[in-house]
Image (cartoon, rainbow, N blue to C red):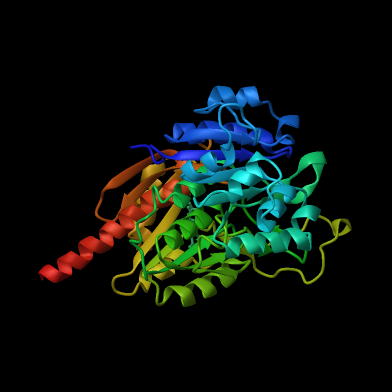
Amino acid sequence: MKSLAGKRIVLGVSGGIAAYKAIELCRRLVDAGAHVVPVLTKGATRFVGRATFDALASERTQMSLFEEDDPIPHTTLGQTADCIVVAPATARVIGAYAAGISSDLLTATLIATRSPVVICPAMHTEMWEHPAVADNIATLIERGVHIVGPESGRLAGGDEGAGRLSSPADIVDAVIRAVGAASERQDMDGLSVVVTAGGTREPIDPVRFIGNHSSGKQGYAFADEAAGRGAEVTIVSTVDRPVPSGAAMVPGITVLRVDTAEEMAEATAEAAAEADVVIMAAAVADFRPVDPAGVKLKKRDGVPAIELEPTPDILAALGASKPEGQILVGFAAETCDVADNAAAKLNGKGADYIVANDVTAENAGFAYDTNEVLVLASDGRIHPVGLRSKRQVAQAVLDLVVADRDARASNQENQ
Ligand code: CTP
């Protein structure tokens, strides 16, 4: 069954440049089986047309508090929704919602509902970081509103910074969780999970490093999914990502920030000693400069000869000292012979599972929001997971981990 089948979702769109992404979001919600009712603010129609939403959604777009065929559309919308998602949510809509002010159909609907609400802010960094907006967001989180994003990246006008709307795939995942359609399960309740995320950085000198393209998205998706299912999660990460689904939705995530393979090895070993599940999603550099320069290397001194040495293999060390009952999940980033290379890593590093992906594949691997993987298990089975959001990949892998734990527990009972 589709994950939002039978669910009535009000899609609120307010006036920001990111409104164009709400079109893709609308389509994805419909694809997930939802009955989508778009509500556009006047500002939104400066960026996107209602005709587009009329064509894609399940009902025609609503904009006015004074519709001819319904004297009180906001209460009808609010009362019948299974979830209201606002994407993009401007500072104005967030402020009005936090203050309980209904100035148009969208803000009136937000106040006239008891359904879960998912707010996806998008605005310039200065606005996002303004104390008034920060206070309003804190108020909404306290009230149990789900906040998704914003992410950091390119903004309108060529600026860079925090304030970019989360991806439609991440927003759909958040809606699924908010309506409880997918993750009502608390099947990781009380488990301690350690996840590593991002690529390590090995210094050459104070300004340069050896690194890789890892964005940390897959690791954070694991952390989010495990926390959503009740686990206590520690992320050992080289990247600063917002805990994407919003602090209100996923309490129980601790982030330990590291840079190098050495630092990651130390932090992970300590956190993993007591963990039930360890997921090595990080892209660890295999080599590091033996002797990083204390001052910036100067061009005028010519091309430097940098002597390299291997970094510690964190996964292999965890595999060698795995406590009884712990499940260890590694990754394999490959560019060819994916299954064979991954099988060698599974056996060589003592992991229970290897999640293998071809990082050259379309829409999969580094920095994408989606992934396509093969999960190799130590019992010889191979589980292909087709192209889907990184959160859904995490869900599929954790389903295997939970089933494995259950099987081990019942084996023990039968002995
Ligand atoms: N890994 C690790 N420590 C390292 C290198 C890799 O813990 N120094 C982990 C990764 O986090 C991943 C798995 O080992 O879970 C496989 O990483 P990958 O980069 O695919 O393979 P490598 O072992 O580095 O081998 P190669 O680069 O030769 O493919």
User: In which quadrant of the rendered view does residue 197 lie?
Assistant: bottom right
* Residue 320 shows up from this direction: yes
Left or right side of 154 for 157: right
Placement of the N terminus among the 4 image quadrants: top left
Left or right side of 283 for 135: right
What residue appears at the point 44 percent right and 64 percent down from the top-left corner? 315
* Residue farthest toward the front in the current orientation of the protein: 71
- 317 relative to 144, above or below: below
Picture coordinates of residue 337 (x, y %)?
41, 40
* Residue farthest toward the right in the current orientation of the protein: 300
* Residue farthest toward the left in the current orientation of the protein: 415
Left or right side of 231 for 235: right
What residue appears at the point 14 percent right and 70 percent down from the top-left corner? 413
What residue appears at the point 57 percent right and 66 percent down from the top-left corner? 261
Picture coordinates of residue 191 (x, y %)?
37, 69
Picture coordinates of residue 409 (x, y %)?
21, 67
Q: How many marks?
A: 0
- 359 relative to 310, above or below: above
What residue appears at the point 24 percent right and 54 percent down from the top-left corner? 379
Residue 19 or residue 300, whichever sits in front:
19
- 286 relative to 169, above or below: below
User: In which quadrant of the rendered view does residue 297 lie?
Assistant: bottom right
Placement of the C terminus among the 4 image quadrants: bottom left
Picture coordinates of residue 258 (x, y %)?
61, 68
Residue 19 or residue 345, whichever sits in front:
19
* Residue 365 shows up from this direction: no
